[in-house]
Image (cartoon, rainbow, N blue to C red):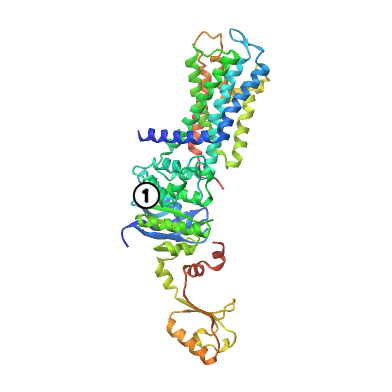
Amino acid sequence: MRLLRLTLNQVRYENKAFWRSPAAAFFTFVFPLLFLFITNTIFGSGEMELPGGTASVSNFYVPAIIAFSAISTCYTNIAIRISYAREQGLLKRVRGTPLPSSAFFAGRIIHACLVAILLVIIIVVVGAVLYDVDVPTNTLPAFLLTLAVGAAALCALGLAISALIPNADASPAIVNASILPLLFASDIFIPLDNAPRWLQILGDVFPVKHFSEALQASFNPFETGYGFEGFALLVMAAWGVAGLLIAVRFFKWEPRH
Amino acid sequence: MNSPVIEVKSLWKTYGSTEAVKGIDLRVGSGEVFALLGPNGAGKSTTVEILEGHRTRDSGEVSVLGHDPARAEQRLRERIGIVLQRSGVEPYLTVEESVEMFRNYYPSPSPLDEVLEVTGLTELRRTRVRNLSGGQQRRLDVAIGLAGNPDLLFLDEPTTGFDPAARRNAWDMIRNLKALGKTVFLTTHYLDEAEQLSDRVAIIVRGEIARAGTTSEMTALGGTHISFRLARGGESLPPPFAGTLQPDGRYQLRSSAVTDDLHGLTTWARHMNCELIDLRVARRSLEDIYLELVGRESGAEA
């Protein structure tokens, strides 16, 4: 009970600080929406082959941008913000108080997930209204499960990489370098149907492509089943566990000098 | 001394081949303001961080409010407040929200208004942290340290970078804490600050306690300085003053028999008919004693 109360306390203040920080709120919401508009404006009128039939390319970009949103809120934001908190001594200060560290991190993670959920809702609504992309119905449970597993894994990986970042100055560079190439190799910015084999393999190794493809499966208008992508979920979960282990093993409360 | 809040016996800490702390003993009584002084790299920060639970020791006994800080127990953290030298606060929260957030961590926190009052932040309670001046942020650090109504407060260089007026305000604030019955463990580079505020002082040099005692004992031990300048005739000064000419052109004697020495000096001056220019008689300050212990070179950088 105490842990829950303290975690919600963290979420509350984290949320206040988030919405007051213009840069954080702006980039978190504006980037994914900008990508959604650009990709759909340029490519959205094209057609693509899906299992079961042919649909507009918007059916690819809406779930792809959902994946991108979850990545930037759960992975990129958590990693960069934890690095800054460490550099400024906030982590060390918190560690000297009776606040359990689990409440501190849970607060950050829950807040990131709430922001991600809000973004996903906006994207799904925009996709349905502007680009005629069906909201998942029979695949809704699969969609939500994929989101949950993906967000959890991304948060764990965000914590893991923040443990390996030497200082805050380096954090945006390291975090972006770790994720941007993968976005191109993972069926997010460009469909990978005709990509070279090595790029496909690269995408298969990391969790991002599995995340994106599992989301796309739940947006496939021709899917008649539930659309669960068991293997993709397993790969994401495995990465999440690995991230958590790295974070626990290597986490630092103070900056390295 | 009343029951100790902090007790340290033969504390050792080594980093690689560097012996940072070499078997020190410390005792801090309840309700005391205790100052740990020493140049950079003398083992001061290491000692404080071990007491705070931020660092582990190699050997020795450490007890803080009856707990071993190395075990990171929640019950100990509920009773101490730590004001680090440098520590961040969420810049987009207000002063009030920041203190309130930390108050929530503790089972019986200090009343919010009292914390803001003691730290002089009442007027700024709705100001966002990013809009505070450096001194105001430092006071917020102290306010957050007080949020949990701690029995023991660690203050690490609370006034570094303050202008003189802000320092006086901070001193008043620390005196207020003492009046509230808190034990304060202070580290500072300012010796006048330690002399003004602390009941007892320990000076750490090269990992060892070079001297410890009450602040008045320490300064009394140092004796009294008699100093003056002469226009002429210095070569015929009476015995205790002969050969005490300093590089700055003043004669200076550390006297343990002030009345006799002064009598001898003034008798001589009248006899010689020469003026004792700018004659000063002063008890030595903590700073003099400190500089003597750490050596002028390392003292300058501290």
Residue A13 located left or right of residue A46: left
Chain letter of mark 1 equals B
Give x and y (percent) for residue A156. Answer: 50, 31
Give x and y (percent) for residue B222. Answer: 45, 73
Please tell me which residue is depicted at 49% across the width and 58% down the height of the picture. Answer: B167
In this orientation, which residue lies closer to the viewer: B101 or A241? B101
Query: Dot 1: few (<14), some (14–19), or many (≥20) neighbours within 10 Å?
Result: many
Q: Is residue A81 visible?
A: yes
In this orientation, which residue lies closer to the viewer: B222 or A160? B222
Asked where in the image residue A195 lies, by quadrant, the reply is top right
Figure check: A99 above or below A210: below
In this orientation, which residue lies closer to the viewer: B192 or B235? B192
Residue located beneath label 1 in the image: B150
Q: Residue furthest front?
A: B123
Where disc 1 sits, the SS reads loop
Please tell me which residue is depicted at 54% across the width and 18% down the height of the picture. Answer: A124
Figure check: B247 above or below A179: below
Give x and y (percent) for residue A67. Answer: 56, 23
